Amino acid sequence: IYTILRNKIITGGTTQFSRFKNLKEVKSLPAGNFLCAKEVFLRVGGFSKDLRYCEDTDFHARLRKQGYKIFYVPGAEVIHLRYYESIYDLAKHMFKYGVGRGYALRVKKNLRTPFYFLLILGFLLNALAEFFYIFLNLAVRTGLRHQYIFLIINLLTIWHKLLSGLLLIYLFIIAIVGLYLSLLERDLVYLIYAPIVGITVHFTYILGLLLGLMGRHLK
């Protein structure tokens, strides 16, 4: 699973799973392996007690805001005991992490980025489109007839087709990742396992993220 999680398409190049060969400036590091001078840690305000997850991301955002730089050091390694014994374990962890990230975005303005605004806007627009599609189709079935209603339904149908196309492109990319890893590792198991892991990571994380944004909080 970890070999798959190190792929940038699967986890977005996060330092949680990435392995860099050289010293590299990064935006954040996992708190499980992070070294900071005590006086700097206290000056910035330390970890937020409000957050169950993403407290390290929040701290690093405040750190960078005050002019400090964060570096990934390849030789600084620790053994962090986290094992995913099954897809279910991975899904459960990614869901919780998504909830934690969503809640952190809700309460910490410094963590909000254009990417997350676009993601939320996309889901809201899609939810609104689905509502109108169902509502207008029900209106037509009850006998309501108007040219503008049919025009809107046709536009929403095109929207559905675009979403279906994007979904197919996404699945194709995930399949390519599986093929790439199977060739790289010389093991055909990645051809099937990588897409399963990728889809599990993305969908459970996004589901958790949305619930976190709506106020769900992990204690």
Image (cartoon, grey):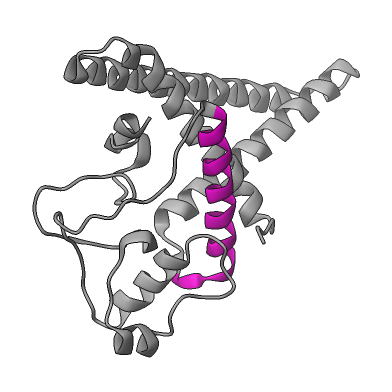
Q: Position of residue 132 (x, y in %)?
A: 72, 33
Q: Say if 63 sits above or below 86 in the image.
A: below
* Quadrant in which the N terminus is drawn: top left
Q: Residue 24: which quarter of the image?
A: bottom left
Q: Which residues are magenta?
A: 88-110
Please name the residue shown 82% across and 19% down the image: 140
Q: Is residue 129 visible?
A: yes
Q: Residue 29: which quarter of the image?
A: bottom left
Q: Say if 207 sits above or below 174 in the image.
A: below
Q: Residue 103: which quarter of the image?
A: bottom right
Q: Nearer the viewer, residue 206 or 120?
A: 206
Q: Position of residue 51 (x, y in %)?
A: 56, 67
Q: Nearer the viewer, residue 141 or 103?
A: 103
Q: Say if 74 sits above or below 167 in the image.
A: below
Please name the residue shown 68% across and 55% down the image: 214
Q: Position of residue 163 (x, y in %)?
A: 51, 25
